[in-house]
């Protein structure tokens, strides 16, 4: 599992009927929480659901549930009536954790509605239009002066979005708590639902109701529902990302220099676009935090377009105002032509209280992070030691292991789980069958991590450790290779960002310094130098741009052993004239066959073809797309092997096409055509080559 994975919110199928979970929904004794299947779900992943602070439940992904929705049955006896936040974490066996968006669970066993419904004040004839939402930057809902309203009442407004099949769209759930003040008694109060929660894909109707806890006696009352149909369709942009919320949380450490947010380049992004980032904070009771609400404008620059990422930083004071809770963020884009776009909502949990981290497990048989297989074979087991300062009798420790072979491929036979209870306060030595470790093969990797639950059932922490299982092999020798053929960078002429990829091989944990001469730039650092640490895969890639034709020398030095270095040269070329209506084309070749590193094609098409739309229409057909055909085993990035793909051109009729391969290929021909130009037929040759 990758860090910062985008996990869809869970959903509660019992809420599909009327937006609440009532006694009829609980006739089988459980509240059901469905976790949707996520990309790259792997055997051994641990999925943990959190029903607010009431219940925590976990499952390990096994062959029976891999790549399927995962259903949790929470005993209804543990869930009193109320409004709750529900989310889940997904952790791989190494301990990389990602946290989903929250959804809202509304449990009201009585279910009797007695209060007048809220009002969608911007709707006309119970229809909410897209124009209205854009004009109001959301939609307003009024909680009216209900029967018996008085200062001190606590009102929870709940907003839900449904698709045409009457299923709740969990990402749109919105719940806000409000304490009634004297000014509300005559006409109620109004809440703005953010525009990022309304016209989501497949959305058909919206519902709202409120729940009142009376200040006079603590009794609870529900309102009737208010419903509106949605009229309009909007294309949503990718949500903003909280850069430092690797596991979905921001703590004191991550917000020291502010709250960093990055926004990936969107389709049609151009200099001059005005991007407005908006944010709203909530405390642990789901009440809005006024001091954590705001917005900022950013005018997109040429540099933003070139890098494909916009970086913004919010004040640390926002996190401080929330302290414990959640921060939502989304953004709007206004183009110079007046077009408007809106993004999905990104969220991060905020916890500025102190956090206790447990130390990583250790491997007593390891020598400098390496265990030779004959050591494991002689002992018959792999020993793992777990020790932490807060250990007490009765702690429940869950150990998980996974493995990858030397190519980075998962090894199913190296997956292992064991749960045990602490019976003595000392280092816990776990003996894992030796076959589990040896399964990764020569130069493979084994990962171990653990989580701890106290006697109270609270999950404390999770850490990870890595070791390398080798059969007498030496550490990886420092090596470098690269792609060749990238065109020189000239964004003013063609709106693409060409680069050559450099690939570095070294032992895991090696500290490296990479440098190149002036006139070239390493995109990872934005300068001519870049320092990094080699990850557990033993291979790291960099991207280099140049404004000059010819060779660019790349120098790589091992900072842990300065006498060890390697030099490589990557070549940059000019664009060449293409076939048919391809005005300019260039491509790289020689990428690693890892299914990720691309050979790229960069091109510029003419605006019009020589083809006529019809026999009677003498005008020339505009060229808007190209078709890419690849032979097996190649694939256009994001598509299947051998699949032909039609791609839209950029506004200036340029395009970048990334081709990847999982296996080495000496030479392969990629065919470029255009559906609008019968005379365009271009062959591009490329190779995929591994380290020798």
Image (tube, grey):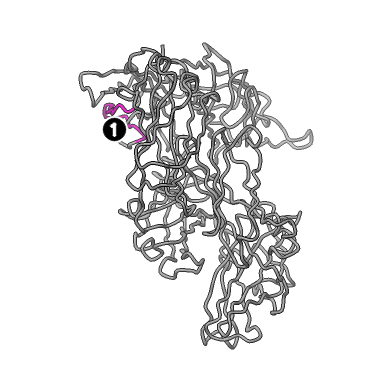
Residue 394 visible? The answer is yes
Q: Residue at x 46, y 27 (%)?
A: 432
> Which residue is at a point 54% across and 44% down the rendered structure image?
267
Q: Which region of the structure is painted magenta? A: 509-524
* Between 661 and 56, the one nearer to me in the picture: 56
**Residue 191 shown left or right of residue 116 in the figure:** left
Asked if residue 341 can be seen in this view, the reply is: no
Above-or-below relation of 137 to 548: below
Is 640 above or below relative to 463? Answer: above
Where is residue 603? Give x, y as percent: 52, 29
Q: Quadrant of residue 637?
A: top right
Furthest-right residue in this view: 616
- Residue identifier under label 1: 531
Q: Secondary structure at mark 1?
A: strand
When the figure is inspected, residue 410 is found, relative to residue 129, above or below; the finding is: above
Question: How dense is the environment of label 1, judged by Cα within 10 Å: few (below 14), some, or many (20 and up)?
Answer: some
Residue 158 x/y as whole percent: 62, 67
Q: Indicate whether residue 433 is drawn in magenta.
A: no
Residue 449 place in picture, x, y as percent: 43, 36
**Could you say where residue 608 lies in the image, as x and y percent from the top left?**
62, 34
């Amino acid at each position: 599992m990758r860090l910062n994975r985008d996990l869809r919110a869970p959903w509660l199928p019992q809420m599909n009927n009327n937006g609440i979970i009532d006694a009829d929904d609980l006739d089988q004794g459980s509240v059901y929480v469905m976790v949707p299947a996520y990309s790259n779900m792997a055997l051994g992943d641990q999925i943990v659901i959190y029903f607010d602070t009431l219940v925590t439940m976990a499952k390990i992904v096994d062959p029976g549930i891999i790549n399927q929705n995962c259903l949790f049955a929470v005993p209804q006896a543990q869930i009193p009536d109320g409004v709750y936040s529900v989310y889940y974490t997904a952790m791989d066996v190494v301990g990389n954790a990602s946290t989903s968006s929250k959804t809202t669970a509304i449990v009201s066993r009585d279910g009797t509605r007695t209060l007048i419904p809220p009002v969608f004040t911007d709707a006309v004839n119970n229809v909410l239009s897209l124009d209205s939402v854009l004009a109001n930057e959301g939609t307003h809902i009024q909680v009216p002066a209900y029967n018996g309203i008085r200062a001190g009442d606590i009102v929870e407004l709940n907003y839900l979005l449904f698709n045409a099949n009457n299923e709740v769209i969990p990402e749109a759930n919105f719940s806000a708590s409000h304490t009634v003040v004297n000014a509300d008694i005559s006409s109620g109060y109004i809440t703005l639902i953010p525009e990022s929660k309304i016209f989501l894909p497949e959305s058909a109707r919206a519902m709202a109701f409120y729940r009142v806890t009376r200040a006079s006696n603590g009794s609870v009352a529900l309102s009737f529902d208010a419903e509106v149909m949605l009229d309009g369709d909007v294309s949503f942009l990718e949500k903003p990302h909280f850069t430092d919320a690797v596991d979905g949380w921001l703590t004191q450490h991550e917000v020291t220099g502010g709250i960093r947010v990055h926004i990936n380049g969107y389709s049609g992004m151009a200099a001059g676009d005005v991007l407005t980032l908006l944010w709203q904070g909530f405390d642990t009771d789901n009440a809005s935090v006024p001091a954590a609400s705001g917005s900022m404008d950013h005018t997109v620059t040429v540099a933003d377009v070139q890098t494909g990422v916009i970086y913004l930083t919010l004040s640390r004071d926002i996190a401080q105002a929330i302290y414990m809770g959640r921060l939502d963020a989304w953004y709007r884009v206004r183009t110079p032509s007046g077009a408007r776009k809106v993004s999905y909502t990104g969220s991060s949990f905020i916890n500025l209280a102190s956090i206790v981290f447990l130390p990583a497990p250790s491997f007593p048989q390891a020598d400098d992070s390496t265990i030779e297989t004959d050591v494991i074979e002689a002992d018959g087991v792999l020993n793992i030691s777990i020790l932490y300062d807060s250990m007490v009798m009765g702690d429940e420790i869950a150990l998980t292991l996974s493995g990858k072979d030397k190519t980075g491929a998962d090894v199913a036979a190296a997956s292992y789980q064991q749960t045990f209870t602490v019976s003595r306060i000392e280092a816990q030595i776990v003996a894992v069958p030796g076959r589990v470790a040896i399964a990764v093969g020569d130069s493979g990797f084994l990962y171990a991590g653990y989580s701890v639950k106290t006697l109270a059932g609270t999950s404390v922490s999770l850490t990870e450790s890595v070791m390398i299982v080798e059969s007498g092999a030496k550490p990886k020798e420092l090596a470098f290779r690269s792609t060749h053929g990238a065109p020189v960078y000239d964004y003013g002429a063609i709106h693409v960002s060409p680069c050559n990829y450099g690939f570095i091989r070294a032992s895991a944990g090696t500290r490296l310094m990479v440098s190149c001469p002036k006139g070239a730039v390493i995109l990872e650092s934005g300068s001519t130098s870049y320092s990094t640490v080699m990850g557990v895969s033993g291979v790291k890639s960099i991207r280099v741009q140049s404004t000059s034709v010819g060779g660019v020398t790349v120098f790589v030095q091992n900072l842990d052993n300065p006498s060890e270095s390697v030099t490589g040269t990557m070549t940059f070329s000019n664009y060449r004239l293409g076939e048919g209506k391809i005005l300019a084309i260039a491509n790289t070749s020689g990428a690693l066959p890892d299914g990720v590193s691309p050979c790229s094609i960069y091109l510029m098409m003419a605006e019009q073809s020589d083809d006529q739309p019809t026999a009677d229409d003498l005008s020339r057909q505009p060229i808007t797309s190209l078709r890419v055909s690849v032979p097996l085993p190649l694939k256009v990035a994001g598509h299947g092997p051998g699949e032909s793909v039609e791609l839209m051109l950029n506004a200036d009729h340029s395009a970048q096409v990334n081709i990847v391969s999982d296996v080495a290929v000496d030479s392969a021909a990629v065919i470029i055509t255009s559906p609008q130009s019968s005379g365009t037929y271009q062959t591009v040759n490329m190779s995929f080559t591994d380290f020798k």
